[in-house]
Amino acid sequence: MRVLVTGGAGFIGSNFVRHVHRERPDWEIVVYDLLTYAGDARSVEGLERVELIQADICNEASIDAAVAATDAVVHFAAESHNDNSLHSPWPFVSTNLIGTYQVLEAVRRHGRRLHHISTDEVYGDLELDDPQKFTPQTAYNPSSPYSSTKAGSDLLVRAWVRSFGVQATISNCSNNYGPYQHVEKFIPRQITELLDGRRPKLYGTGENVRDWIHAEDHSSGVLAILERGQIGETYLIGADGERNNREVVALILRLMGHEPDAFDHVNDRPGHDLRYAIDASRLREELGWRPSYRDFEQGLAATISWYREHEAWWRPQKRETEARYRVLGR
Ligand code: NAD
Ligand code: DAU
Protein backbone atom coordinates (compact mmCIF):
# COMPACT_ATOMS: atom_id res chain seq x y z
CA MET A 1 0.00 0.00 0.00
CA ARG A 2 1.30 3.45 -0.97
CA VAL A 3 -0.84 6.20 0.53
CA LEU A 4 -0.78 9.89 -0.41
CA VAL A 5 -1.45 12.21 2.54
CA THR A 6 -2.24 15.77 1.42
CA GLY A 7 -1.54 18.29 4.19
CA GLY A 8 0.62 15.65 5.90
CA ALA A 9 3.04 18.27 7.29
CA GLY A 10 0.24 20.06 9.17
CA PHE A 11 -1.04 19.35 12.67
CA ILE A 12 -3.47 16.45 12.18
CA GLY A 13 -1.90 15.23 8.94
CA SER A 14 1.48 14.74 10.63
CA ASN A 15 -0.15 12.97 13.60
CA PHE A 16 -1.87 10.69 11.06
CA VAL A 17 1.42 10.03 9.23
CA ARG A 18 3.10 8.96 12.49
CA HIS A 19 0.06 6.84 13.42
CA VAL A 20 0.07 4.99 10.07
CA HIS A 21 3.87 4.68 10.13
CA ARG A 22 3.59 2.89 13.49
CA GLU A 23 0.42 0.84 12.85
CA ARG A 24 1.07 -0.23 9.22
CA PRO A 25 4.82 -0.96 9.00
CA ASP A 26 4.54 -2.29 5.42
CA TRP A 27 2.92 0.89 4.00
CA GLU A 28 4.74 3.64 2.14
CA ILE A 29 3.54 7.18 2.86
CA VAL A 30 3.85 10.14 0.51
CA VAL A 31 3.23 13.51 2.15
CA TYR A 32 1.95 16.07 -0.38
CA ASP A 33 2.12 19.52 1.23
CA LEU A 34 2.69 23.08 0.06
CA LEU A 35 4.38 23.91 3.40
CA THR A 36 2.35 27.09 3.92
CA TYR A 37 2.82 29.01 7.20
CA ALA A 38 0.87 26.09 8.82
CA GLY A 39 3.01 23.24 7.46
CA ASP A 40 6.41 22.18 8.81
CA ALA A 41 8.64 19.53 7.24
CA ARG A 42 10.17 18.89 10.69
CA SER A 43 6.81 17.43 11.84
CA VAL A 44 7.42 14.33 9.67
CA GLU A 45 11.22 14.25 9.39
CA GLY A 46 13.29 11.21 10.28
CA LEU A 47 10.59 8.65 9.41
CA GLU A 48 11.61 5.82 7.11
CA ARG A 49 9.15 4.98 4.32
CA VAL A 50 7.88 8.60 4.34
CA GLU A 51 8.55 10.85 1.34
CA LEU A 52 7.70 14.57 1.14
CA ILE A 53 6.53 16.33 -2.03
CA GLN A 54 6.30 20.11 -1.60
CA ALA A 55 3.51 21.15 -3.99
CA ASP A 56 0.10 22.79 -4.21
CA ILE A 57 -3.11 20.69 -4.43
CA CYS A 58 -4.41 23.41 -6.78
CA ASN A 59 -1.66 22.54 -9.28
CA GLU A 60 -3.35 20.07 -11.63
CA ALA A 61 -0.18 18.51 -13.09
CA SER A 62 1.52 18.00 -9.71
CA ILE A 63 -1.45 16.48 -7.91
CA ASP A 64 -2.23 14.30 -10.94
CA ALA A 65 1.28 12.81 -11.00
CA ALA A 66 1.28 12.20 -7.24
CA VAL A 67 -2.16 10.54 -7.26
CA ALA A 68 -1.20 8.36 -10.24
CA ALA A 69 1.78 7.02 -8.27
CA THR A 70 -0.20 5.95 -5.17
CA ASP A 71 -3.02 3.52 -4.25
CA ALA A 72 -5.13 5.75 -2.00
CA VAL A 73 -5.39 9.40 -0.97
CA VAL A 74 -6.21 10.84 2.46
CA HIS A 75 -6.99 14.51 1.91
CA PHE A 76 -6.17 16.72 4.94
CA ALA A 77 -4.76 19.75 3.08
CA ALA A 78 -6.77 22.88 3.85
CA GLU A 79 -6.64 26.39 5.18
CA SER A 80 -7.86 25.57 8.68
CA HIS A 81 -8.08 28.65 10.93
CA ASN A 82 -11.38 30.51 11.36
CA ASP A 83 -9.78 33.80 12.47
CA ASN A 84 -7.63 33.91 9.31
CA SER A 85 -10.68 33.19 7.14
CA LEU A 86 -12.46 36.23 8.59
CA HIS A 87 -9.50 38.44 7.79
CA SER A 88 -8.55 37.02 4.38
CA PRO A 89 -10.97 34.48 2.84
CA TRP A 90 -9.39 33.92 -0.60
CA PRO A 91 -6.84 31.22 0.35
CA PHE A 92 -9.76 29.28 1.88
CA VAL A 93 -11.78 29.44 -1.36
CA SER A 94 -8.72 28.48 -3.36
CA THR A 95 -7.30 25.59 -1.32
CA ASN A 96 -10.47 24.18 0.24
CA LEU A 97 -12.70 24.36 -2.86
CA ILE A 98 -10.47 24.50 -5.96
CA GLY A 99 -7.82 22.30 -4.35
CA THR A 100 -10.40 19.65 -3.41
CA TYR A 101 -11.77 19.83 -6.96
CA GLN A 102 -8.27 19.05 -8.33
CA VAL A 103 -7.86 16.14 -5.88
CA LEU A 104 -11.25 14.75 -6.95
CA GLU A 105 -10.46 15.04 -10.65
CA ALA A 106 -7.11 13.28 -10.13
CA VAL A 107 -8.64 10.35 -8.20
CA ARG A 108 -11.38 10.14 -10.85
CA ARG A 109 -8.85 9.97 -13.71
CA HIS A 110 -6.77 7.29 -11.99
CA GLY A 111 -9.54 5.32 -10.21
CA ARG A 112 -7.99 5.80 -6.76
CA ARG A 113 -9.65 5.44 -3.31
CA LEU A 114 -10.14 8.80 -1.51
CA HIS A 115 -10.84 9.67 2.10
CA HIS A 116 -11.80 13.33 2.56
CA ILE A 117 -11.15 14.99 5.94
CA SER A 118 -13.72 17.50 7.09
CA THR A 119 -14.99 19.22 10.20
CA ASP A 120 -18.05 19.30 12.46
CA GLU A 121 -18.26 23.06 11.74
CA VAL A 122 -20.10 22.33 8.48
CA TYR A 123 -23.20 21.77 10.66
CA GLY A 124 -23.12 25.27 12.20
CA ASP A 125 -23.55 25.48 15.96
CA LEU A 126 -25.85 24.18 18.73
CA GLU A 127 -27.55 25.89 21.67
CA LEU A 128 -25.87 25.16 25.01
CA ASP A 129 -28.88 23.11 26.17
CA ASP A 130 -29.66 21.33 22.87
CA PRO A 131 -29.97 17.59 23.71
CA GLN A 132 -29.31 16.64 20.05
CA LYS A 133 -25.67 16.35 18.94
CA PHE A 134 -24.49 16.51 15.28
CA THR A 135 -25.19 13.31 13.29
CA PRO A 136 -24.55 12.48 9.62
CA GLN A 137 -28.17 13.53 8.98
CA THR A 138 -27.78 17.06 10.43
CA ALA A 139 -28.38 19.75 7.78
CA TYR A 140 -25.35 21.77 6.66
CA ASN A 141 -25.39 25.33 8.07
CA PRO A 142 -21.80 26.70 8.11
CA SER A 143 -21.05 30.10 9.65
CA SER A 144 -17.59 31.30 8.57
CA PRO A 145 -15.62 31.48 5.31
CA TYR A 146 -13.57 28.55 6.67
CA SER A 147 -16.53 26.30 7.49
CA SER A 148 -18.47 27.24 4.35
CA THR A 149 -15.54 26.27 2.11
CA LYS A 150 -15.17 22.99 4.02
CA ALA A 151 -18.92 22.39 3.55
CA GLY A 152 -18.54 23.11 -0.17
CA SER A 153 -15.65 20.65 -0.41
CA ASP A 154 -17.79 17.92 1.23
CA LEU A 155 -20.57 18.56 -1.29
CA LEU A 156 -18.10 18.27 -4.18
CA VAL A 157 -16.97 14.88 -2.82
CA ARG A 158 -20.57 13.68 -2.51
CA ALA A 159 -21.32 14.77 -6.09
CA TRP A 160 -18.18 13.05 -7.46
CA VAL A 161 -19.23 9.80 -5.71
CA ARG A 162 -22.75 9.92 -7.10
CA SER A 163 -22.07 11.33 -10.58
CA PHE A 164 -18.73 9.72 -11.42
CA GLY A 165 -18.57 6.70 -9.11
CA VAL A 166 -15.49 7.99 -7.28
CA GLN A 167 -14.63 5.62 -4.39
CA ALA A 168 -14.70 8.13 -1.53
CA THR A 169 -15.62 8.41 2.14
CA ILE A 170 -15.88 11.57 4.27
CA SER A 171 -15.26 12.18 7.97
CA ASN A 172 -16.30 15.22 10.00
CA CYS A 173 -14.33 15.53 13.23
CA SER A 174 -14.56 17.80 16.27
CA ASN A 175 -11.78 19.99 17.76
CA ASN A 176 -8.42 18.23 17.92
CA TYR A 177 -5.63 18.78 20.43
CA GLY A 178 -2.18 17.23 20.84
CA PRO A 179 1.43 17.70 19.67
CA TYR A 180 2.48 19.64 16.54
CA GLN A 181 -0.54 22.00 16.54
CA HIS A 182 0.20 25.53 15.28
CA VAL A 183 0.37 28.14 18.08
CA GLU A 184 -2.42 30.18 16.43
CA LYS A 185 -4.96 27.61 17.76
CA PHE A 186 -6.64 27.92 21.16
CA ILE A 187 -4.85 25.33 23.32
CA PRO A 188 -1.25 25.76 22.06
CA ARG A 189 -1.70 29.55 22.06
CA GLN A 190 -2.56 29.59 25.76
CA ILE A 191 0.21 27.11 26.70
CA THR A 192 2.88 29.08 24.83
CA GLU A 193 1.60 32.44 26.14
CA LEU A 194 2.10 31.08 29.68
CA LEU A 195 5.53 29.67 28.79
CA ASP A 196 6.41 33.19 27.54
CA GLY A 197 5.25 34.76 30.82
CA ARG A 198 1.97 36.25 29.47
CA ARG A 199 -1.67 35.54 30.36
CA PRO A 200 -4.12 33.34 28.38
CA LYS A 201 -6.64 35.18 26.18
CA LEU A 202 -10.29 34.19 26.20
CA TYR A 203 -12.61 35.33 23.41
CA GLY A 204 -15.82 36.95 24.70
CA THR A 205 -17.33 35.34 27.79
CA GLY A 206 -15.64 31.97 27.23
CA GLU A 207 -18.96 30.12 27.34
CA ASN A 208 -18.41 28.61 23.87
CA VAL A 209 -18.21 24.83 23.97
CA ARG A 210 -15.88 22.65 21.89
CA ASP A 211 -15.90 18.82 21.79
CA TRP A 212 -12.21 17.93 22.28
CA ILE A 213 -10.56 14.81 20.81
CA HIS A 214 -6.86 13.89 20.79
CA ALA A 215 -5.31 13.93 17.28
CA GLU A 216 -4.18 10.33 17.86
CA ASP A 217 -7.84 9.25 18.20
CA HIS A 218 -8.82 11.23 15.09
CA SER A 219 -6.05 9.34 13.26
CA SER A 220 -7.23 5.87 14.37
CA GLY A 221 -10.76 6.81 13.26
CA VAL A 222 -9.55 7.89 9.82
CA LEU A 223 -7.51 4.71 9.35
CA ALA A 224 -10.55 2.57 10.29
CA ILE A 225 -12.71 4.41 7.73
CA LEU A 226 -10.03 4.23 5.02
CA GLU A 227 -9.74 0.47 5.47
CA ARG A 228 -13.28 -0.60 6.37
CA GLY A 229 -15.65 2.33 5.72
CA GLN A 230 -18.53 2.07 3.24
CA ILE A 231 -17.95 4.01 0.02
CA GLY A 232 -20.14 7.10 -0.21
CA GLU A 233 -20.72 7.28 3.56
CA THR A 234 -20.02 10.09 5.99
CA TYR A 235 -18.63 9.22 9.45
CA LEU A 236 -18.55 11.65 12.38
CA ILE A 237 -15.49 11.41 14.65
CA GLY A 238 -15.70 12.64 18.25
CA ALA A 239 -14.85 11.42 21.76
CA ASP A 240 -17.57 13.01 23.96
CA GLY A 241 -15.14 15.69 25.15
CA GLU A 242 -17.37 18.76 25.56
CA ARG A 243 -15.88 21.60 27.65
CA ASN A 244 -16.36 25.34 27.55
CA ASN A 245 -13.36 27.55 26.79
CA ARG A 246 -13.29 29.01 30.31
CA GLU A 247 -12.97 25.51 31.79
CA VAL A 248 -10.15 24.64 29.36
CA VAL A 249 -8.21 27.83 30.19
CA ALA A 250 -8.68 27.23 33.94
CA LEU A 251 -7.39 23.66 33.53
CA ILE A 252 -4.33 24.78 31.54
CA LEU A 253 -3.61 27.42 34.20
CA ARG A 254 -3.91 24.87 37.03
CA LEU A 255 -1.77 22.25 35.24
CA MET A 256 0.91 24.92 34.65
CA GLY A 257 0.92 26.10 38.27
CA HIS A 258 -1.13 29.33 38.03
CA GLU A 259 -4.36 30.59 39.60
CA PRO A 260 -7.40 29.44 37.53
CA ASP A 261 -8.60 33.04 36.95
CA ALA A 262 -5.25 34.44 35.75
CA PHE A 263 -6.48 35.07 32.18
CA ASP A 264 -7.66 38.11 30.16
CA HIS A 265 -10.89 38.56 28.22
CA VAL A 266 -10.21 39.83 24.67
CA ASN A 267 -12.42 40.83 21.70
CA ASP A 268 -14.79 38.08 20.60
CA ARG A 269 -14.58 36.43 17.16
CA PRO A 270 -17.28 37.82 14.81
CA GLY A 271 -20.00 35.21 14.22
CA HIS A 272 -18.38 32.98 16.90
CA ASP A 273 -20.04 29.51 16.89
CA LEU A 274 -21.47 28.73 20.33
CA ARG A 275 -21.24 24.96 20.66
CA TYR A 276 -20.22 21.85 18.72
CA ALA A 277 -21.00 18.27 19.83
CA ILE A 278 -20.53 15.02 17.90
CA ASP A 279 -22.54 11.80 17.96
CA ALA A 280 -19.98 9.23 16.74
CA SER A 281 -22.33 6.22 17.00
CA ARG A 282 -21.88 5.10 13.39
CA LEU A 283 -18.08 4.94 13.72
CA ARG A 284 -18.32 3.11 17.05
CA GLU A 285 -21.04 0.64 16.04
CA GLU A 286 -20.22 -0.03 12.38
CA LEU A 287 -16.41 -0.01 12.59
CA GLY A 288 -15.86 -0.79 16.31
CA TRP A 289 -13.72 2.36 16.79
CA ARG A 290 -12.94 3.51 20.35
CA PRO A 291 -10.87 6.55 21.46
CA SER A 292 -7.75 5.74 23.48
CA TYR A 293 -7.55 9.15 25.24
CA ARG A 294 -10.52 9.04 27.63
CA ASP A 295 -9.19 11.52 30.22
CA PHE A 296 -8.95 15.08 28.81
CA GLU A 297 -6.89 16.30 31.78
CA GLN A 298 -4.25 13.61 31.18
CA GLY A 299 -4.16 14.31 27.43
CA LEU A 300 -3.85 18.04 28.10
CA ALA A 301 -1.04 17.51 30.64
CA ALA A 302 0.86 15.43 28.05
CA THR A 303 0.30 18.17 25.44
CA ILE A 304 1.62 20.84 27.85
CA SER A 305 4.73 18.69 28.43
CA TRP A 306 5.21 18.36 24.67
CA TYR A 307 5.18 22.16 24.19
CA ARG A 308 7.55 22.62 27.15
CA GLU A 309 9.96 20.14 25.58
CA HIS A 310 9.66 21.32 21.95
CA GLU A 311 10.19 25.08 22.10
CA ALA A 312 12.51 24.82 19.06
CA TRP A 313 9.54 23.51 17.03
CA TRP A 314 7.01 26.25 17.95
CA ARG A 315 9.24 29.26 18.60
CA PRO A 316 9.58 30.25 14.89
CA GLN A 317 5.75 30.57 14.58
CA LYS A 318 5.11 32.54 17.75
CA ARG A 319 6.09 36.17 17.11
CA GLU A 320 4.27 36.46 13.74
CA THR A 321 1.16 34.75 15.14
CA GLU A 322 0.88 37.17 18.05
CA ALA A 323 1.53 40.11 15.70
CA ARG A 324 -1.47 38.98 13.61
CA TYR A 325 -3.64 38.70 16.74
CA ARG A 326 -2.61 42.20 17.89
CA VAL A 327 -4.00 43.61 14.60
CA LEU A 328 -7.32 41.86 15.34
CA GLY A 329 -7.34 43.08 18.96
CA ARG A 330 -7.34 39.49 20.16
P1 NAD B 1 -3.20 22.74 9.56
O1 NAD B 1 -3.50 24.14 9.16
O2 NAD B 1 -2.38 22.47 10.76
O3 NAD B 1 -2.51 21.96 8.34
C1 NAD B 1 -2.90 22.13 7.01
C2 NAD B 1 -1.79 21.61 6.11
O4 NAD B 1 -2.20 21.74 4.74
C3 NAD B 1 -0.47 22.39 6.26
O5 NAD B 1 0.62 21.48 6.35
C4 NAD B 1 -0.39 23.21 4.98
O6 NAD B 1 0.94 23.46 4.56
C5 NAD B 1 -1.14 22.31 4.00
N1 NAD B 1 -1.72 23.06 2.87
C6 NAD B 1 -2.46 24.20 2.93
N2 NAD B 1 -2.79 24.61 1.69
C7 NAD B 1 -2.27 23.70 0.84
C8 NAD B 1 -2.29 23.57 -0.57
N3 NAD B 1 -2.91 24.47 -1.36
N4 NAD B 1 -1.67 22.50 -1.14
C9 NAD B 1 -1.01 21.59 -0.36
N5 NAD B 1 -0.95 21.67 0.99
C10 NAD B 1 -1.57 22.72 1.56
O7 NAD B 1 -4.62 22.04 9.68
P2 NAD B 1 -5.13 20.88 10.66
O8 NAD B 1 -5.66 21.48 11.90
O9 NAD B 1 -4.10 19.82 10.74
O10 NAD B 1 -6.38 20.36 9.81
C11 NAD B 1 -6.19 19.34 8.81
C12 NAD B 1 -7.54 18.99 8.22
O11 NAD B 1 -8.42 18.55 9.24
C13 NAD B 1 -8.27 20.17 7.54
O12 NAD B 1 -8.91 19.67 6.39
C14 NAD B 1 -9.26 20.63 8.58
O13 NAD B 1 -10.39 21.23 7.97
C15 NAD B 1 -9.62 19.31 9.24
N6 NAD B 1 -10.09 19.37 10.63
C16 NAD B 1 -9.35 20.02 11.58
C17 NAD B 1 -9.77 19.99 12.91
C18 NAD B 1 -8.97 20.66 14.01
O14 NAD B 1 -9.41 20.66 15.16
N7 NAD B 1 -7.80 21.23 13.74
C19 NAD B 1 -10.94 19.31 13.25
C20 NAD B 1 -11.69 18.68 12.25
C21 NAD B 1 -11.22 18.71 10.95
O1 DAU C 1 -14.50 21.90 15.24
C1 DAU C 1 -13.43 21.60 14.42
C2 DAU C 1 -12.63 22.85 14.12
O2 DAU C 1 -11.90 23.15 15.29
C3 DAU C 1 -11.69 22.69 12.93
O3 DAU C 1 -12.46 22.50 11.77
C4 DAU C 1 -10.79 23.91 12.76
O4 DAU C 1 -9.84 23.68 11.73
C5 DAU C 1 -10.06 24.16 14.07
O5 DAU C 1 -9.26 25.33 13.97
C6 DAU C 1 -11.06 24.28 15.21
O6 DAU C 1 -11.87 25.48 15.03
P1 DAU C 1 -12.18 26.46 16.27
O7 DAU C 1 -12.48 27.80 15.71
O8 DAU C 1 -13.12 25.82 17.21
O9 DAU C 1 -10.72 26.42 16.97
P2 DAU C 1 -9.78 27.54 17.64
O10 DAU C 1 -8.60 26.80 18.20
O11 DAU C 1 -9.51 28.67 16.74
O12 DAU C 1 -10.69 28.07 18.84
C7 DAU C 1 -11.27 27.19 19.79
C8 DAU C 1 -12.17 28.01 20.69
O13 DAU C 1 -11.35 28.87 21.51
C9 DAU C 1 -13.11 28.93 19.95
O14 DAU C 1 -14.34 29.00 20.67
C10 DAU C 1 -12.43 30.29 19.96
C11 DAU C 1 -11.69 30.26 21.29
N1 DAU C 1 -10.41 31.00 21.39
C12 DAU C 1 -9.48 30.82 20.40
C13 DAU C 1 -8.25 31.44 20.48
C14 DAU C 1 -7.21 31.26 19.41
C15 DAU C 1 -10.14 31.79 22.50
O15 DAU C 1 -11.00 31.95 23.40
N2 DAU C 1 -8.93 32.40 22.58
C16 DAU C 1 -7.97 32.27 21.63
O16 DAU C 1 -6.86 32.85 21.77
Image (cartoon, rainbow, N blue to C red):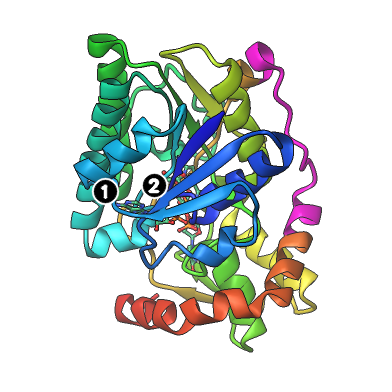
Q: Tell me the kind of residue under disc 1.
A: Thr
Q: Can you say which quadrant of the picture contains the N terminus?
A: top right
Q: Position of residue 326 (x, y in %)?
A: 36, 82
| Residue that protrudes farthest toward the bottom in the picture | 197
| Residue 27 seen in the current view | yes
**Does the magenta segment cover residue 125?**
no
Residue at 44% x, 62% y is: 39
Q: How crowded is the residue under tag 2: few (<14 C-alpha within 10 Å), some, or many (20+)?
A: many
Q: Nearer the viewer, residue 47 or 8?
A: 47
Give the magenta range.
284-300
- Residue 214 position (above or below residue 278): below
In the image, which disc is placed on residue 117? none
Q: Tell me the kind of residue under disc 2.
A: Ala
Q: Position of residue 133 (x, y in %)?
A: 53, 27
* Residue identifier under label 1: 95
Residue at 53% x, 55% y is: 11
Residue at 46% x, 66% y is: 203
- Contact (Cβ within 8 Å) of mark 1 with mark 2: yes
Q: Position of residue 37 (x, y in %)?
A: 38, 68
In the image, which disc is placed on residue 77? 2
Q: Position of residue 180 (x, y in %)?
A: 59, 61
